[in-house]
Image (cartoon, helix red, strand yellow):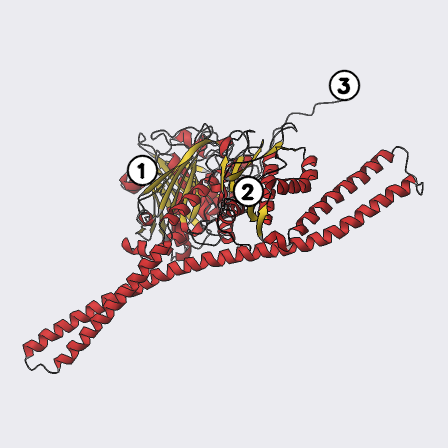
């Protein structure tokens, strides 16, 4: 006999408040609610959505949202629209007529109407129907207590065509089918400021760069249609246009073009695993398209297209940043000017490297670009929505998306910087200075001639002659005024160039100051670390001796662990002590003088200081190719210690992603010819990212990324290495990837000291 008795079988009951929780309490703003409704119209193959504000100054204003989409038959209204979480859009189905990708699949968007009003009247009609369906919903009924969801009933009417109802049968653009929602008892006070905000958001709801030409949203206030701003005119002022794609195979391609500079640059195509190191084998975000316009506020370019600075500002206030569009509809808040909208941290990147485009390490700011990322539900299923419809869930797929877009932007920044350097801003400065001098000279000349004409009038007796001189005087004054305007324009342009130059010099000064401060801090830390390491090492030795002399006893079985821990303390303090001594040795005056240096000695000294750290990371240091004797080079010894430390540090990072502990190798090979000393530095790490072989030497360019795909590290290491090799040592450096050990390989060549000409002992 069983000790359990079945009472019955029962379903989950759904409380009447569920529509409120999924509607008004899950949607943060009225603008989001409108966007959800507009998406429903798009899914219904509408070509136009009209949002009308009626009686805004009255006590009972209403909002009418109507489209010329497919409309709904009775079965669709009852079994789809009135079913919460319906699956009719689930699974990436296409729309009925136009084959559009369905933008909504959760079946919850219509509940957002509760965020806007207390009462809804919905009218809908298909092309085949002779009658109109009308649904009435009172949202306040969902606030009643002790009811289940199925207890709330809504009236549905069939409306026949008549003289009285004729207007109800006409939808957007006089189409005889579509859907209309009439919102009564509005919950917001729709003043002009709120309407303007809605207008702004709706203008960005569908990407202006996405090629959607058969769908538009129009706002109408008291019968006056609001024209949404057309961004395409200002796009003509773009200096650069970036078109990029990460396809379904994980192949990244990009083209950077400029009509202004008559240039087009292709990024070498690369597979994801070679393009961005240290992540999954394939992009978890799925395929993406990316388009970005770079539109800086350069007066001369704007004037050439009849734009003013205030036109640029108005455009950028609305369009700045990089937005995300899924199936052509915007995903908020990405691209908003504040807060989470700068999801790529373009502002932070730019503030960390504030120089102009000509300066190495330049980073673009969000207010200089207008861009869009295109994804879809069907191909980017891992990019899931947050429950509040504001943003995507931040996980591996989203972080891969971030990493990809930032890598494309790095390509743009690098190539735009190179192009700016090729255009020689110094020549531009000289040219603008000449223009200022010329227009100033012409202004003075016209004014002098006008003064002479003014004086000559007093000596003219004939009225006709006086009139002729007066006309000439007016022409000269007009010419002087135009020349003065040119002078002001050229002076402003000249001031912009000088300001960019000043910013670059100021940024360079700050970088050098920071490096100097870092050096001082390193010396101070090394002094303190050396003292405390000696103290820790002495006490570790004393502790071991006291134990061995029997001054204290250990619990049974803990002897080996105790002695092992003592060994770790001694080894760790020895490493810090050796490295501190090495750092302190760098501040000796002789290190800062150019002299004959034997690279083999420098290599062995640096590697000795780092050997313990490499051993702990199971990295083999192969110095078999470093001979006992080598021709000297005339350089700063401290430079070459820094070069080697940077290369080894980068190799340690590159060896981290490799699975297992085998074949983790750093190899240094040194040889000489009749004219130079050659150093080959290679590792078995992950190698250099495809397309970054030149960019890695630029200031502030880094390929190190955190788990979220954002670049970390200063990006200064290899830039400093290149400077020390090429500018301080008259040498050359290049990178090969993959190298002889399958990772990165750096090849350095430096003139022998008996060949090199010049070079002061500094």
Quarter of the view holding residue 451: bottom left
Q: Which mark is residue 2?
A: 3
Q: From the image, state whether disc 1 or disc 2 is nearer to you.
A: 1
Q: Residue at x 78, y 49 (%)?
A: 534
The earlier-in-sequence mark between 1 and 3 is 3
- Whole-number angstrom distance, CA of label 3 to CA of label 2: 43 Å
Q: Is residue 270 left or right of residue 13?
A: left
- Whole-number angstrom distance, CA of label 1 to CA of label 2: 34 Å
Q: Which mark is residue 214?
A: 1
Q: From the image, state whether disc 1 or disc 3 is nearer to you.
A: 1
Residue 288 showing in the rendered view: yes
Observer-nearest residue: 565 or 194?
565
* Mark 2 lies on residue: 21
Q: How far across and down, in percent of the image, does residue 377 sit?
A: 46, 32
Tell me the element at label 2. Answer: helix
Residue 28 showing in the rendered view: no
């Amino acid at each position: 006999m069983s000790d359990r008795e079945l009472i019955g079988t029962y379903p989950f009951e759904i409380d009447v408040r569920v529509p409120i929780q999924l509607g008004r309490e899950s949607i943060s703003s009225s603008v989001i609610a409108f966007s959800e409704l507009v998406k429903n119209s798009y899914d219904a193959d509408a070509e136009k959505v009209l949002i009308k504000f009626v009686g805004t100054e009255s006590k009972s204003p209403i909002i009418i949202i109507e489209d010329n989409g497919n409309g709904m038959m009775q079965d669709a209204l009852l079994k789809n629209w009135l079913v919460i979480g319906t699956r009719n859009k689930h699974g990436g189905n296409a729309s009925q007529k136009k084959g559009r990708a369905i933008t909504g699949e959760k079946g919850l968007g219509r509940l957002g109407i509760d965020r806007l009003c207390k009462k809804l009247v919905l009218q809908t009609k298909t092309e085949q129907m002779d009658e109109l369906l009308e649904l009435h919903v009172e949202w306040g009924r969902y606030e009643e207590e002790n009811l289940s969801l199925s207890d709330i009933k809504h009236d549905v009417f069939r409306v026949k065509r008549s003289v009285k109802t004729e207007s109800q049968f006409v939808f957007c653009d006089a189409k005889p089918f579509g859907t209309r929602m009439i919102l009564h008892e509005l919950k917001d006070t729709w003043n002009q400021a709120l309407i303007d905000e809605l207008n702004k958001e709706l203008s960005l709801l569908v990407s202006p760069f996405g090629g959607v030409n058969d769908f538009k949203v129009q706002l109408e206030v008291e019968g006056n249609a609001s024209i949404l701003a057309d961004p395409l005119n200002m796009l003509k002022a773009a200096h650069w246009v970036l078109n990029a794609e990460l396809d379904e195979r994980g192949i990244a391609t990009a083209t950077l073009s400029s009509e202004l500079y008559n240039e087009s640059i292709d990024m070498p195509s690369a597979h994801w695993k070679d393009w961005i190191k240290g992540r999954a084998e394939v992009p978890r975000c799925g395929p993406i398209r990316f388009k970005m316009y770079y539109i800086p506020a350069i007066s001369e370019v704007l004037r050439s297209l009849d734009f003013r600075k205030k036109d640029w500002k108005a455009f950028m206030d609305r369009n700045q940043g990089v937005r995300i569009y899924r199936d052509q509809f915007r995903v908020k808040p990405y691209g908003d000017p504040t807060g989470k909208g700068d999801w790529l941290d373009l502002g932070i990147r730019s503030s960390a490297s504030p120089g102009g485009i000509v300066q190495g390490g330049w980073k673009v700011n969000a207010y200089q670009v207008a861009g869009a990322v295109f994804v879809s539900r069907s191909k980017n299923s891992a990019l899931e929505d947050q429950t509040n419809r504001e943003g995507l869930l931040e996980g591996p797929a989203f972080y891969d998306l971030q990493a990809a877009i930032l890598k494309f932007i790095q390509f743009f920044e690098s190539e735009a910087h190179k192009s700016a350097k090729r255009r020689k801003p110094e020549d531009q400065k000289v040219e603008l200075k000449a223009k200022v001098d010329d227009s100033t000279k012409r202004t003075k000349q016209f004014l002098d001639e006008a003064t002479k004409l003014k004086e000559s009038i007093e000596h003219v007796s004939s009225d006709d002659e006086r009139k002729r001189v007066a006309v000439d005087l007016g022409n000269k004054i007009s010419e002087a005024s135009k020349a003065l305007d040119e002078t002001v324009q050229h002076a402003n342009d000249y001031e912009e160039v000088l300001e960019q130059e000043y910013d670059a010099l100021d940024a360079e000064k700050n970088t050098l100051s920071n490096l100097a401060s870092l050096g001082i801090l390193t010396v101070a830390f090394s002094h303190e670390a050396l003292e405390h390491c000696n103290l820790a090492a002495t006490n570790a030795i004393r502790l071991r001796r006291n134990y061995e002399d029997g001054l204290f006893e250990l619990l049974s079985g803990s002897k080996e662990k105790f002695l092992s821990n003592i060994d770790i303390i001694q080894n760790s303090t020895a490493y810090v002590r050796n490295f501190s001594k090495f750092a302190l040795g760098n501040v000796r005056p002789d290190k800062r003088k150019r002299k004959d240096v034997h690279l083999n000695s420098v290599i062995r000294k640096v590697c000795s200081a780092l050997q313990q750290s490499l051993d702990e990371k199971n990295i083999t240091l192969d110095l078999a190719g470093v001979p006992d004797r080598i021709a000297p080079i005339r350089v700063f010894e401290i430079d070459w210690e820094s070069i080697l430390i940077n290369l080894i540090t980068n190799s340690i990072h590159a060896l981290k992603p490799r699975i297992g502990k085998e074949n983790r190798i750093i190899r240094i090979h040194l040889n000489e010819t009749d004219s130079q000393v050659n150093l080959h530095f290679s590792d078995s790490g992950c190698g250099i990212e495809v397309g970054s072989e030149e960019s890695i030497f630029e200031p502030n360019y880094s390929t190190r990324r955190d788990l979220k795909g954002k670049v970390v590290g200063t990006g200064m290491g290899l830039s400093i290495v290149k400077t020390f090799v090429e500018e301080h040592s008259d040498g050359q450096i290049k990178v090969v990837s993959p190298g002889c050990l399958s990772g990165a390989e750096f090849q350095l060549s430096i003139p022998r000291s008996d060949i090199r000409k010049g070079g002061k002992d500094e």
